Image (cartoon, grey):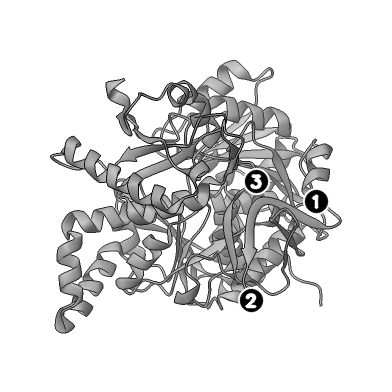
Amino acid sequence: MDQQLVYESFIQNVQQRHDDIFLRQIIDRQFKDFTYGDVLDQALRLVSAFRDMGLQPGEKIALISKNCAEWFIADLAMMLGSYISVPIFPTAGSDTISHVLTHSESKLLIIGKLDSNEPLETSLNQALETPLPTVSIPYPGTIEGDYNWLDLIANHPPSEERPNHQPDDLMSIVYTSGTSGLPKGAMLTHGGFAWSGNKIIEHIDLQLEERAFSYLPLAHITERVYILATAMSAGICTAFPESLDTFIDDVKMHRPTLFISVPRLWTVFQQGILEKLPQKKLNILLKIPLLNNLIRKKVIDGLGLDQARVLGCGSAPVSPALLRWYETLGMNITEAWGLTEGFAVATFNFPYRSDKVGSVGNAASGIELKIADDQEILVRSKGMFSGYYKNQQATAETIINGWLHTGDIGEIDSDGYLTITGRKKDTFKTAKGKFVAPVPIEKRLFEIANIEMMCLIGSGLPGPILLAVPHDYPDFDQARYEKKIQRVLDTINSELESHARLRGALMIAEPWSIENDILTPTLKIKRHKLEKRYQDIGQNWPEGKTVVWEKDL
């Protein structure tokens, strides 16, 4: 029997569970619920509306919005109407927005919840050569579009058309978050999307009573496959937060059984816990038999994760020390790994194995891994992209003889568990002519240092330099913190070969963010930007100093 595509599975769920709640959007501290029947009805009305606008099957429709129920409905409408969806990160800058809209040849843009309208307005008003029709989803502050979402749904009947897609039909063009240069458009098929979603459903044995919480950007392939595809295919009730300010309360309202995050946010959660319960006190309480379980329960309840059966982490390297810290609280966080080009599905440390923390798990069934002669990780499966849109050269460099060349380097142990040791392009050569792989050093630094964010640079420099964003402590004592960093440098340098030893640490004045263009929308650090920005300081490092504060330069 041929595998059902995602929209086909969803239609089957509607037939079986028409009046059950599928999506829960928090508005004014209340759930606004959408049943399976509601979601299909609204999606089919949108198909009719798009047809009335003159949009032809196969044309591209872009979508820029924070996660919300309407994001799911719009994506389903595009599947049912045979349109090719082009999601855009809600935090994207105007240059990226303009590039994606122009490069993809999108014929319509759906606009939803955004924290800032300025980049989008700049793109729509100044950068695009020809005006692009827009549909606005009516959330507070949303840009007023040419069409109103609610009016389109109210004024159009449900389409009676039903698509008959083949597995190789193009479903979406997902632009990579771009840690270097302009993002490339990965072409994703209906078959690859369904296969990948089903792999997750099988691997973690998702059940009907599961609850998912969708807040990581749906424009990123991880959230789109791990949450949207599995929810539509397996029939999983999914909720969306109201705002960043209410995030933890929103999680508590839904109490998800499936919760995925990224290393940066797991670190933020840890900091919030330690602000209320300092580490020394926490260590003592966890050693007291009658109190330890109460403390663990209080912490987990405080995050709204008391019902969570699966906790996940991915999208960027995570410190094993952070995962170990959560393990002491009874929270086993599964690390997973994948790429946009492979629908984000490759390896999982699930079922959770404590002895494999530090690896990203082993390959799911149907996925092949191998390590090339230069240590690059290669992947092959049925969940592979079909190439980069309008970029045959990059496609040919990425898929060779059926194997996806990931750009990550790593090693596989005797149990088949994969450990990522870095990115091929991140490895740099110092002025001494020696190569340094920064990721293993950064992982070790995260274990021994209390640093908010860090990045090692060194291309063409006399030696590597650590760029560090210190924690924002109340009553910050700079001299005391500097002594701690000096001890960290002494420790790490005692463990490294001479060519890899750090010359010093530059304490960064302004925290890195998406807004200042150092973090990608998935919170990865753009190392190449930092290399360029701090090249002069690295070349002219102050004599006799190991810890330097950017604000004092």
Pair 1/3: label in front: 3
Residue that numbered label 1 is attached to: 399
Amino acid type indicated by mark 2? Ser
Q: Position of residue 440 (x, y in %)?
A: 50, 53
| Residue density around tag 2, few if under 14, some if 14–19, many if 20 or more, within 10 Å | few
- Note whether residue 419 is visible: yes
Q: Earlier in the sequence, mark 1 or mark 3?
A: 1
Q: CA distance from mark 1 to mark 3?
A: 16 Å
- Disc 1 and disc 2: Cα gap in Å? 26 Å
Image-quadrant location for residue 94: top right
Q: Is residue 153 above or below residue 22?
A: above
Q: Quadrant of residue 348?
A: bottom right
Q: What residue is at 77 percent from the left and 47 percent from the top?
A: 398
In this rendering, does residue 44 appear at all? Answer: no
Label 3 element class: loop
Classify the position of the C terminus by image quarter.
top left
Relative to residue 76, is residue 252 drawn left or right? left
Question: Does residue 240 lie above or below 534 as drawn?
Answer: below
Percent position of residue 289, x then y: 17, 84
- Furthest residue in direction bottom, as rendered: 289
Q: Are marks 1 and 3 in contact (CB under 8 Å)?
A: no
Residue 397 lies left or right of residue 68; in this view the side is right
- Residue 210 vs 400, above or below: the answer is below
Q: Which residue is mark 2?
A: 414
Give yes or no for contact between labels 2 and 3 (Cβ–Cβ under 8 Å).
no
Q: What residue does disc 3 label?
A: 424
Earlier-in-chain disc, 1 versus 2: 1
Please, what secondary structure does the residue beneath circle 2 have?
Answer: loop
Nearer the observer, 113 or 445: 445
**Which residue lies at the image location 62% right of the left edge and 26% below the top edge?**
98
Residue 53 vs residue 464, the one in the foreground: 464
**Mark number for residue 357?**
none
